[in-house]
Image (tube, rainbow, N blue to C red):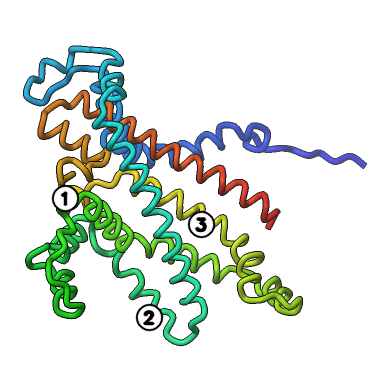
Amino acid sequence: MRFNIRYSSAAQSPGPALNESLAVPLRLLLPAFFSVAIVVVLPLLFSLYTSFTAYRLIDPDTIWNVVGLRNYMRAFANGDFWAAFGRTVLFLTIALNLELLLGLGIALLLNQIVKGQRALRTIMMFPMMFSPVLVGFQFKFMLNDSTGVVNHVLQTVFGLKTTIPFLVDAQSALASLIAAEVWNSTPVFAVILLAGLMALPKDPIEASKVDGCTPWQTFRYVTLPYLMPFIYIAMTIRSLDVGRAYDIVRIMTNGGPGGRTELLWTMVGRIAYDDSRMGYANAIGYVSVLVSVLFTLYFFRKLNAARKHMGPA
């Protein structure tokens, strides 16, 4: 018995059909690619180029004055740059750890609540709805040494005789900036960690109770290892945000007193727009980006290690 099997030309050569099916999505995505190129890629390339020039806003012709690595070498030789660099790393480290501890505590508490949890989750997310500029103004007025509500409470309730200049003293000013940043962004950690707790399998927890583990032992050896990937995801997201902190610092202290709260990005803004040295400012800006990228890569490595430790899903 003989069978005559005929294949269509489309089945014999799927290439043209496949190319045609891909051509339509690519054509539809072209406007998006074009917009991204104009809004993101071109400004990045322009700022990278100007970081190697002596470009000043008040003298547009200096954009063609290429100085090579002079701006970067000048930044690394500048004591103010290293002071701002150290404060940025300190600000980043303290803020991230406080947000982690507070967010984890809030997530653990909400995970224990059954009735009204949805309403509490909504309330918990309120600080995220405020822009950093508004948060900066809010804390600036609250911590004012003459009319601020914090000093008023300390004087009327706790009997404090003198006011505390929160935003004038160098140490208290930096602590106030960290407090504002933590208040604004702790819900990010809380939401991500609460999602991890809600996805946590019940069997390991029940098994630990059967084995006689205390609540602390259950958290330390069962819950926390499972949450580590979620923790590093939150750390990765927040390290990028905190590393480029500008709005809150600009509004509350503007880098003062005496530059004692100036971070890398506020230094970039001052040099670029107050001093008009755009090329030098862009060089410092790219160093700041490098700091954020290094923190992000560190947390990515920790995230991959935590996933390997958890094993395949």
Numbered tag placed on residue 231 in the rendering: 3
Which image quarter holds the C terminus?
bottom right
Please state which amino acid type lies under the numbered disc 3: Ile
Residue extending farthest to the front is 161
The residue carrying mark 2 is: 119
Which residue is label 1 attached to? 253
Alpha carbon separation for disc pair 2 and 1 = 35 Å
Choose top left, top right, bottom left or bottom right for residue 80.
Answer: top left
Inspect the image, locate mark 1, and give the three-letter code of the amino acid beneath it: Thr
Marks 2, 1: nearer the viewer: 1
- Determine the CA span between mark 3 and mark 2: 24 Å
Which is more foreground, mark 3 or mark 2? 3
* Mark with earlier residue (3, 1): 3
Q: Residue at x 52, y 44 (%)?
A: 300
212 up-or-down from 100: above or below: below
Q: Secondary structure at mark 2?
A: helix
How far across and how far down the image is residue 102, in percent? 42, 66
Instruction: Give x and y (percent) for residue 31.
Output: 32, 39
Does residue 80 lie above or below 98 as drawn? above
Circle 1 crowding by C-alpha within 10 Å: few under 14, some 14–19, many from 20: many
Classed neighbour count for the residue bearing mark 3: other residues with Cα under 10 Å, few (<14), some (14–19), many (≥20) = many
Direction bottom: furthest residue: 115
- What secondary structure is found at the residue carrying circle 1? loop
Residue at screen point 13% across, 16% down: 62
